[in-house]
Amino acid sequence: METLRALPSVHQLLEEPEAEPLVRRHGRPLVLFAVQAVLERERQAGRVEEPPTRWREVEAAIVRLREPRLRPCINATGVILHTNLGRAPLAEAAAAAVVEVARGYATLELDIESGKRGLRHDGVSRVLTHLTGAEAAAVVNNCAAATLLMLSALARGREVIVSRGELVEIGGAFRMPEIMRLSGARMVEVGTTNRTRLTDYEAAITPKTAAILKVHASNFQVVGFTESADLHGLAVLAHGRGVLLLEDLGSGALLDSAPFGLAPEPRIQESIAAGADLVACSADKMLGGPQAGLLLGRSAVVERALKHPLARAVRVDKMTLAALAATLDIYLTQAHASLPTWRMIALTPDALAARATVWKRRLDEWGVPVTLRAGESTVGGGSLPGERLPTTLLSITAPRASASGLVSRLRRNATPVIARVEAGQVVLDPRTVLPGEDEALLEAVRAAVS
Ligand SMILES: *Cc1c(COP(=O)(O)O)cnc(C)c1O
């Protein structure tokens, strides 16, 4: 009891000189809250701390609340579209466009010519249709939302035919059978895991069929004895029988990945040309834009999707649209080198080796033990599974530190550095480290090893 009586009151503490700078920096309510919390802890523990310790804890309690969870980090994993790290980094022009509309008002749903209410998609739709050949386009929150909206608006209460080889799980709770159930469509599975033919789809069409759905196997491969129906054949079948052909394309590239030494990732314009009525894809995968979902296809079908109440629930904000418009402008002007995603894909083995060599030289000077070795980067983010891009890895060979300890120290750096562990060693891949991040990365490595 004696000790507890020695605890100061909240009021007394706030009068102490240490309170003043904290109040100035963090505001009085937050300091009051932290003081109360720290005193309560002392009371519970039956302990009275010395003032310096107590004030340190007060400050720590404030910092815990104020420290942003979301902050920039350095991606040294070599996974270009890393979902946990926000997928595609935006092009400079796209980031600038976000800042420009974020600060004030924007003509989000205003038609400048007529002064009347416009559609928020209008600006980007025009560019999307130009780039893909689709009649119409809409933008929603992400590809999962686009797929859910597509099925809800076009197939609720009716049947949708899908191959057993395409009942994918994209990650998290996005599993095709569940999205289908949620949309109110009845899923009709055809074929087998490894082989589904056009005739399988054909045999499953009934008067209750609303659509055939094609789903891109974006994050896994089925190899060996496989067969699937091509999109054009499905389009001819669907249209001959009066049903829709829908596609969940996932990544949705506009550029051809083959010239970069990668397997061809299906492109949006190819799906439209093959006759798909509506295609859903992501904007932050191989398109290299902000998180968004695109719906592209025939005007009447896009319109039906946009009229569904869900469209309002999954709509995008002005910042997303600004970033997307600026990203698409890069495709319009063929200035692809300014898209970070494609610039990283295009990095040559020589350029990567040269950069890793510079890193090694600096770390050698500081006495940090590192070696270089050949390795592989990946595109990631549910694109091009199994595809590898040759790179040079910087491997940290600190004898005393465990790999998991090193990785966690790098992660807890002021600017977190995300590395990967390969064969028991921490490796850093220059491919995904953005220009201008080298110095911070090397300092982080030095600090983590010391
Ligand atoms: C990635 C992916 C999705 C989900 O896309 P999000 O933009 O993350 O919602 C859906 N379907 C396929 C085939 C995908 O590859």
Image: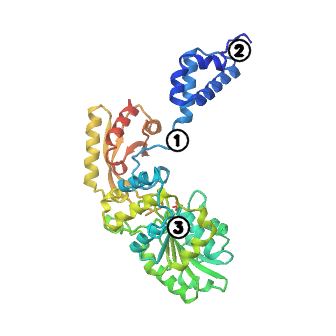
Asked whether mark 1 lies closer than 8 Å to ligand 1, one says no
Label 2 crowd bin: few (<14), some (14–19), many (20+), radius 10 Å? some
Where is residue 415 drawn, in percent x and y?
Answer: 42, 39
Q: Quadrant of the N terminus?
A: top right
Residue 288 vertical position relative to residue 306 in the rendered view, above or below: above
Label 1 crowd bin: few (<14), some (14–19), many (20+), radius 10 Å? few
Instruction: Examine the rendering and report whether any part of residue 267 can be seen.
Output: no
Distance in Å between CA atoms under marks 3 and 2:
66 Å
Pointer 1 and pointer 2: residues touching (CB < 8 Å)? no
Distance in Å between CA atoms under marks 3 and 1:
38 Å
Q: Quadrant of residue 173?
A: bottom right
Residue with the mark numbered 3: 117
Seen as rendered, the residue at the extreme right is 1
Residue 385 vertical position relative to residue 352 in the rendered view, above or below: below
Residue drawn at the location 60% of the way across and 72% of the way down: 307
SS class of the residue under badge 1? loop
Pointer 3 and pointer 2: residues touching (CB < 8 Å)? no
Here the colouring is rainbow
Q: Nearer the viewer, mark 3 or mark 1?
A: 3
- The kind of residue tagged 2 is Leu
Residue drawn at the location 67% of the way across and 15% of the way down: 7
Asked whether mark 2 lies closer than 8 Å to ligand 1, one says no
Pointer 3 and pointer 1: residues touching (CB < 8 Å)? no
Residue with the mark numbered 2: 4
Label annotation for residue 69: 1
- The kind of residue tagged 3 is Arg
Q: Name the N-terminal-most of marks 3 and 2.
A: 2
Instruction: Examine the rendering and report whether any part of residue 87 can be seen.
Output: yes
Q: Name the N-terminal-most of marks 1 and 2.
A: 2
